[in-house]
Amino acid sequence: MSDPQDTKLAGPDLAQGVALADLADGAMLLGHKDGEAALLARRGDELFAIGATCTHYGGPLAEGLLVGDTVRCPWHHACFSLRSGEALRAPALNAASCWHVERRDGKAFVGAKIEPPKRAAAPARAPQSVVIVGGGAAGQAAAETLRREGFAGRLTMLSADASAPVDRPNLSKNYLAGTAPEDWIPLRPSEFYRDQGIELKLGARVEAIEPTARQVVLTDGSRHGWDALLLATGAEPIRLDLPGATLPHVHLLRTLADSRALVAAAKPGARAVVVGSSFIGLEVAASLRARDVAVQVVSLDAVPMIRVLGDEVGSSVRRLHEQHGVVFHLGTAPTAIDARAVTLRDGTKLEADFVVIGVGVRPAIALAQAAGLTIDHGVSVDEYLQTSAPGIYAAGDIARWPDRGSGQRIRVEHWVVAQRQGRTAARNMLGARERFDAVPFFWTEQYDFVLAYVGHAERFDRVLIDGDLAARDCTVSYFAGDRRLAVATVGRDLQSLRTELDFERAIAKAAA
């Protein structure tokens, strides 16, 4: 992660003019305007100027991809309008700067800034009140989108968490590793919710949903009525049912409080056992090693992350961790935890000052199930993210939707997917009738290894690697028969963006 303010200016001063002959159709030129990094882009006869730094994690948009009148970030696939700078796709929340461009004497001159677009007018048939249950990625994105799209009614977000919505991916990555300060973690400052008229209630646990009465009931007995309801309850970490699993030094990781507790435990020289070799477990392992904690990983899997990334990539990730001092115990599981050690099936005892359980999550569907909504390995929704009950939508980790990319109903536990679903659900509450067709995307960072993944391969029978995995320069394609379902890239950010676009075009073609 980098601070956009630390970006060094490069290229020409775009206010002084750039020869049009030096800017080909479809090209971008990195420069600067009034002390800010800027891009000059050309699409046919149109010229655009936009801030060169992604507003998410500071990614270099000059290394991204132009698609129509938008530019996509190479790091985490955020997307910005070249015309207004508006953040069109997660994970970016804030708009990029945007400038007017003038043509004079065969040159392009970047001039005054373009004012951000005004809030849209409220749709005529907009609901009067919206309640969002959940304070994670989907809920936050929905609340912001409702206001941006002109919704002026009552907007309530009920979050069981003690903290306002946070950048959850960072809790196992940079923040836990000690390379991101805590003030980067909140998605928005507290005054944002007040200024936007979002009634954010923390520590608010919903006890029941009453679809007929259109009310939600909290555990304190209070009620909130709604014309439209979004369920964005997310997922809950799986807890192990074994002796010692609830001891104070045994940690889960889902909330900011969880990550803070791990940071407090992760003293240099401490010994940790991480149970689970999925993304969350291995990201935690890498972050703890950055704090000079001795780490041992225990997993039932024979190869880390094999179910998602396959044998060869998983084995490579294992070697990476071993090079950083992580010790693996694979094909086994803990049978007991005590104050000083974790006992494995064969009786081996692993000394541990603290333990992290990272064996996966379960969708939090109890509320939906009790309300009589259709359940299918998650909350079943249609292509518009509406549940079986009119006026109730679901987004994020709980939503199982018809994915035209894979041709299956799927449920995905990824941050960017949740944000994009929250945006789509909000627009559909306002009558947009917008299909959710976004291609799933996630990324993982472990040490200096970064992998980006687009698509969804719940099951695959063939893996094709193009490039050199050991050199961290490769494209990994996952197939079921002859159908390519997903692609992971290492060191090929632009290829990841192009693959995402290929998947999108295939979906659009199939729908035509």
Image: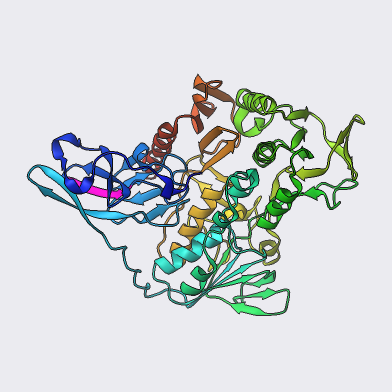
Q: Is residue 342 above or below residue 202?
A: above
Along the viewing direction, whichever of 186 and 242 lies nearer the viewer? 186
Tell me how the rendering is colored.
rainbow
Q: Is residue 269 magenta?
A: no
Determine whether, in the image, residue 484 is placed left or right of residue 504: right
**Which percent across, then down, holds residue 97?**
33, 55
Q: Residue at x 37, y 75 (%)?
A: 124
- The magenta-colored residue range is 46-51
Q: Is residue 469 above or below residue 258?
A: above
Determine whether, in the image, residue 56 is placed left or right of residue 11: right
Q: Residue at x 54, y 29 (%)?
A: 478
Magenta stretch: helix, strand or loop mostly: strand
Q: Residue furthest right?
A: 347
Determine whether, in the image, residue 173 is placed left or right of residue 104: right
**Which percent across, then down, holds residue 260?**
69, 54
**Which percent across, then down, holds residue 256?**
66, 56
Along the viewing direction, whichever of 62 and 182 lies nearer the viewer? 182
Residue 413 visible in image: no
